[in-house]
Image (tube, grey):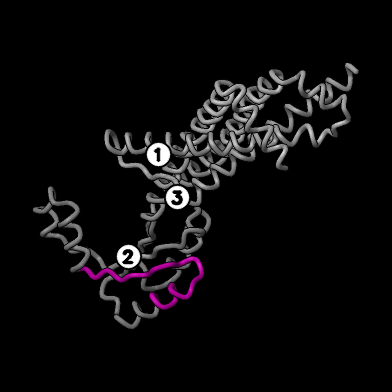
């Protein structure tokens, strides 16, 4: 291990520009992947924010007694899909309408709005089927006159979330594969620059792992360095967008650390593939 680390340091001293080129290439490859990740993260956050507004509203029959309301509220609170249940009195409904629709205040002042029950669902129960199921249960109560939840809007939102999830996963895999290919190509350049040295090591009896180890360490360290630089670039880009256009969400510290580990893994895999290819070619030529 000490010899392998020494070889890595010697290689950097011999060709610092090539090492910097490799790190820069890795950094920008991971930076592109990170930008895509930021877009996916903020899109998911935006969809989650919209999903948080999904609610089922059950309008009650006029003059519904308090006992019936309490029974309905308690029954809905016991359901596993429900996160919160609230009762909105006619007066509260009127005050809310005045605040939200101030331009129609003159019309609203003469109106009488019905009381209602507002039901919010848990995060894992906001799909169209779960919402429809809960709304059907609400509609079965005699005290409920009408149930509304924006069926078409909910179905479109769920469809968008599904498409975004599938597309995000597919594009993420493509970006990762492109990063591995680019990183492998840059490490391949470093290996070709030391092809004669590798051949001498192989001729004197060095095992394949002994030959691989310095390059695996080198690729892993370059992946870590590239990951750190990519994280800093992504943080700068996120700050610029937040100041200039719209406030965006950045990765959590755990996600940043995971990204750096991914950079290390990609550097390791790229090195392994490049060195293995070179060794196989050397054995065929021997």
Q: Exactly how many numbered labels are in the figure? A: 3
Could you tell me which secondary element the residue under label 3 belongs to? loop
Quick check: 87 left or right of 174?
A: left
State whether residue 151 is above or below residue 182: below
Residue at (88% x, 30% y) in the render: 205
User: Residue 65 at what x, y percent from top left?
Assistant: 29, 80
Residue at (14% x, 56% y) in the render: 108
Could you tell me which secondary element the residue under label 2 belongs to? strand
Quick check: 11 left or right of 102?
A: right
- Dot 2 or dot 3: first in sequence order is 2
Q: Nearer the viewer, mark 1 or mark 2?
A: 1
Residue of label 3: 252
Query: Which region shows up in magenta?
Result: 72-90
Quarter of the image with the C terminus in it: top right
Give the class, few, some or many, for how many residues have Cα within 10 Å of label 2's Cα (few <14, many ≥20). many
How far apart in space, not on screen, are marks 1 and 3 (Cα)?
Answer: 11 Å
Give the class, few, some or many, for how many residues have Cα within 10 Å of label 1's Cα (few <14, many ≥20). some
Could you tell me which secondary element the residue under label 1 belongs to? helix
On residue 235, the disc is 1
Quarter of the image with the N terminus in it: top right
User: Residue 100 at what x, y percent from top left?
Assistant: 19, 53
For residue 169, which quarter of the picture? top right
User: Residue 279 at what x, y percent from top left?
Assistant: 82, 25
Residue of label 2: 59
């Amino acid at each position: 291990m000490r010899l392998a680390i020494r070889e890595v340091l010697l290689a950097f001293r011999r060709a610092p520009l090539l090492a910097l080129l490799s790190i820069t290439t890795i950094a920008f490859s991971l930076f592109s992947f990170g930008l895509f990740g930021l877009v996916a993260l903020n899109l998911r956050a935006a969809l989650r924010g919209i999903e948080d507004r999904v609610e089922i509203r059950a309008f009650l029959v006029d003059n519904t007694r308090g006992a019936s309301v309490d029974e309905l509220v308690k029954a809905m609170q016991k359901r596993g899909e429900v996160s919160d249940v609230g009762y909105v009195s006619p007066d509260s409904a009127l005050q809310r309408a005045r605040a939200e629709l101030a331009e129609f205040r003159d019309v609203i002042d003469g109106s009488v709005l019905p009381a209602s029950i507002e039901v919010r669902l848990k995060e894992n129960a906001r799909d169209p089927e779960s919402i429809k199921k809960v709304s059907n249960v609400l509609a079965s109560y005699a005290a409920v006159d009408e149930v509304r939840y924006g069926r078409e809007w909910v179905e479109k939102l769920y469809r968008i979330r599904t498409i975004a999830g599938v597309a995000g996963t597919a594009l993420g895999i493509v970006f990762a594969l492109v990063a591995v290919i680019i990183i492998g190509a840059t490490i391949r350049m470093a290996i070709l620059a030391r092809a004669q040295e590798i051949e001498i090591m192989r001729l004197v009896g060095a095992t394949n792992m002994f030959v691989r180890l310095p390059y695996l360490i080198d690729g892993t360290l370059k992946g870590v360095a590239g990951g750190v630089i990519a994280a800093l670039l992504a943080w700068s880009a996120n700050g610029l967008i937040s100041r200039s256009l719209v406030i965006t969400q950045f990765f959590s510290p755990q996600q940043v650390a995971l990204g750096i580990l991914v950079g290390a893994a990609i550097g390791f895999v790229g090195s392994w593939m490049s060195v293995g290819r070179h060794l196989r070619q050397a054995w065929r030529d021997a």
